Amino acid sequence: MAAGRKKKRKELFALGNEAVVEGALLAGCSFYGGYPITPSSEIMEVMAQRLPKNDNGVFLQMEDEIASMGAVIGASLAGCKAMTATSGPGFSLMQEHLGYACMVEAPLVLVNVMRGGPSTGLPTSPAQGDVQQARWGTHGDHSMIVLSASNVQECLEMTITAFNMAEKYRTPVVLLLDEITAHTREKITIPREDEYEVFNRVVPTMPPEWYKPFEETVRGVPPMPPIGSGYRFHVTGLTHDPNGFPTSRPEEVADLMERMFRKIDQFLPQVSLYEEYLCADADVCVVAYGSVARSAEYAVEQARERGVKAGLLKLKTLFPYPRAATEKVMGHARALVVPEMNMGQISREVKRVNNGRATVRALNRVDGQIITPSEILKAIMQV
Amino acid sequence: MKQGVNLERFEIRLSGLGGQGIITLGRVLGAGLALGHGYQVTQTQSYGPEARGGSSRCDLVVSSGKISYPKAQSLDLLVALSQEACNAYYSFLKPGGILVLETDLVRQPPTNLYLGLPFTEMAASKVGIVQAMNTIVLGAISYLLPFVEQRIMRSSLQSALPAKIRDVNTKAFNLGHREAKREFGEQPEIWKGKPEEREGSDI
């Protein structure tokens, strides 16, 4: 090979779930603990094949989803980039430990491939019913990063992004897919090493006796040593002081809570990911995410052919809700259409941001079928 | 890989019974079109407990450009390997779309405009393994579709299979292609691109 010539990118014909694994391995994931459930099972299957082949890779099948999340938090504290994947009922079981991960600030990635619910629900049909649960599912006031992906290449990219955000902000990150994205096969391109960024967590550099595990820093994110590296610290789900020990002193509690919100909120522009498609002059704008965004894209093209200036705002970050992006399209769009495979979990956010300025039309479907382009087109033409 | 023909949005549905290898067929066809021929392809499938023993379905959308909506809506090609599947999906065929049938299993075709071969019987008598039926179908489809090159699809098939069944599947693929050439006659008129676009096609 001639010098300076770049290596050819590897192409695969892969499922969305398989792309998640590719992304996780590129991001440096070294621990997977989980319990299989459709439509997320392929993530676990492929992980079981691939992860043990890595030098430091550990794959664990746990007895249930509660234990899976416990294992992932443990691995994360031990210095691994750790993840798990689940769906509907499993996601409910993981909520308790998700809160624990928020409290101890353990970076981890949780992939939830949404299927119809509540409870055992619709195995295995697509839905987007876990959006607000991903944000508010665990109890107590907390900040949460929730991402989504709409096609197979994005599954790979957003998994890398999820790991990076988790490590950067020391927080659990939820990646929401739906059954269609997870079970569609498409051509994906594995990026070369110099084409994607991997963020590794910040470890303390001070002598161990000076280290305070939950101390205030400029970014709001304290450095995190792997357990066993000489830095001793206490980890608890109780509200804790900068040394990690339980406290109920109001000023210490307030400091902790405010820092845990601030560490994400102050980076809102970096965390808010979205794509605009034909938005610049749109009269009617569709706000969509996940597989529905693909239907919406098709509908927007058809509406343009019929002379309606339509556009698409595709959300890649669902929470913190990309407020600025929505406000920008509302500047010129007189109506917003929000198609979702639930009863209106993101249209609620859109309406909150909109605050009466534009017409917001929610288009909901909860019968386990994808929203078709023609349904969205009809809504665009009506408003 | 250069694309032979410029495609707008070409929709294929493969349907039949669970166990016939429909999904595998779709996966190999999809991989061949995406990796071998360089098209954009999305492949989706029916997914649920009813897929085992009941009906099975696999959709492919092929395009030269980006594919927005990943599911098939109006079909250019419907392959029905059971009567039930034929009844269920015939109405999704767009006007002028091509219907390919398993003539032993679809006793009552909904129209006289179809192309058919007894794929299962061919697999049993000529290949010796009935499971190779889906590969015969792949061979036949590779003949029908003007944007598929037999050579590329065959090597894609071979790379998707473990070594011990590679030879028998190659045989089945060639059989399907040969029989389709003989029985189906000319490639369907409506799919033929402009002559210059069809250059490089060795069929």
Image (cartoon, grey):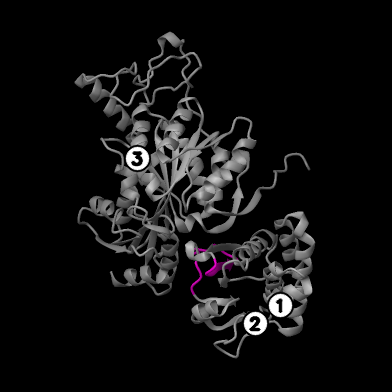
Compare residues A306 and A318 and report the one nearer the observer.
A318
**Does the CB distance between marks 1 and 3 fall below 8 Å?**
no
The image's mark for residue A95 is: 3
Q: Secondary structure at mark 1?
A: helix
Residue A314 on the magenta segment:
no
Can you say whether A223 is above or below A28 in the image?
above
Quickly name the residue at label 1.
Answer: B121
Q: Residue placed at 19% from the left, 21% from the top?
A: A250
The image's mark for residue A312 is: none
Figure disc tally:
3
Compare residues A312 and A93 and report the one nearer the observer.
A93
Residue A267 appears in view: no
Can you say whether A365 is above or below A21 in the image?
below
Q: B143 left or right of A328?
A: right
Residue A314 appears in view: yes
Q: CA distance from mark 3 to mark 2?
A: 53 Å
Q: A95 left or right of B190?
A: left
Q: CA distance from mark 2 to mark 1?
A: 8 Å
Badge 1 local density, few (<14 within 10 Å), some, or many (20+)? some
Are labels 3 and 2 on one chain?
Answer: no
- The chain letter for the residue carrying disc 1 is B
Quickly name the residue at label 2.
Answer: B104
